[in-house]
Amino acid sequence: MYKKLILILGLLVALPALSNSALFDQHFNDYSENLSDAQDVNKDGIFIFFHLDDCPFCQKMERHVLNQPKVIEYFKAHFLNYKINTKSNLEMIDFNGNDTNERFFAKRHNRIGATPVLAFFDLKGNRVVRRTGFANQQDFLLLAKYMVEKAYLKEKFVRYKRKHR
């Protein structure tokens, strides 16, 4: 009886983490290949969640936003989705095919300081939309729509957000 109860409690605790992983796509840290994959399946771009394991706002986004069905559905439809730990030395290949590591890619290529950073890249590997800090579900989805509609070419997100409230 107690073993079953412990198993059930363990599953309930793990459930948010499992749903969050549903958002992020598997890959081999070759972002030039990921870019090609996004083009092949007609995505609007690539989304990268730059985070730190001990960042409270990153954890809050993972627990309350990134695991929500509406978010997962929209992001899976429009983007290939990845997460990068800004302190990781994991080797990777950037959008241009250059060898680097996740920390260098975050700090030098994308000027990531504070986390979380919500970064959207077009199908050429250019970062076109970026937001630093926690975003609730509504703002996060609106930011994604801003990217999908290419509204960033015409106006700042603040103005776009005011029009869509």
Image (tube, helix red, strand yellow):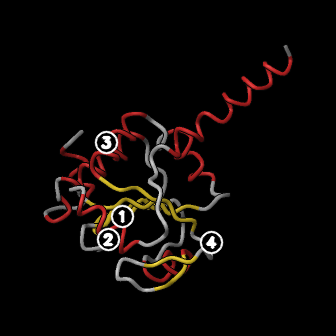
Q: Earlier in the sequence, mark 3 or mark 4?
A: 3
Residue 74 has which mark? 3
Closer to the camera, 138 or 149? 149
Q: Earlier in the sequence, mark 3 or mark 2?
A: 3
Disc 4 from disc 2: Cα separation: 20 Å
Q: Amino acid at mark 3?
A: Tyr
Q: Which residue appears at 52% of the width and 38% of the height?
A: 19
Disc 3 from disc 2: Cα separation: 19 Å
Q: Mark 4 touching mark 1, by CB under 8 A?
A: no
Q: Nearer the viewer, mark 1 or mark 2?
A: 2
Please, what secondary structure does the residue beneath circle 1 have?
Answer: strand
Residue 93 has which mark? none
Q: Earlier in the sequence, mark 4 or mark 2?
A: 4
Whether 36 is drawn above or below 137: the answer is below
**Rendering coords of residue 41 (x, y %):** 24, 56
Residue 87 has which mark? 4
Please, what secondary structure does the residue beneath circle 2 have?
Answer: strand
Q: Amino acid at mark 4?
A: Lys
- According to the image, label 2 marks what residue? 127
Q: Nearer the viewer, mark 1 or mark 3?
A: 3
Q: Which residue appears at 47% of the width and 56% of the height?
A: 26
User: In terms of image quadrants, where is residue 136?
Assistant: top left
Q: Earlier in the sequence, mark 1 or mark 3?
A: 3
- According to the image, label 1 marks what residue? 130
**Rendering coords of residue 82 (x, y %):** 45, 59
- Horizontal side of 102 relative to 119 (left or right) equals right
Whether 42 is drawn above or below 28: the answer is above
> Which residue in the rendered view is the most extreme toward the left?
154
Residue count near mark 3 (Cα–Cα under 10 Å), binned few <14, some 14–19, many ≥20? some
Disc 1 from disc 3: Cα separation: 18 Å
Q: Amino acid at mark 2?
A: Arg
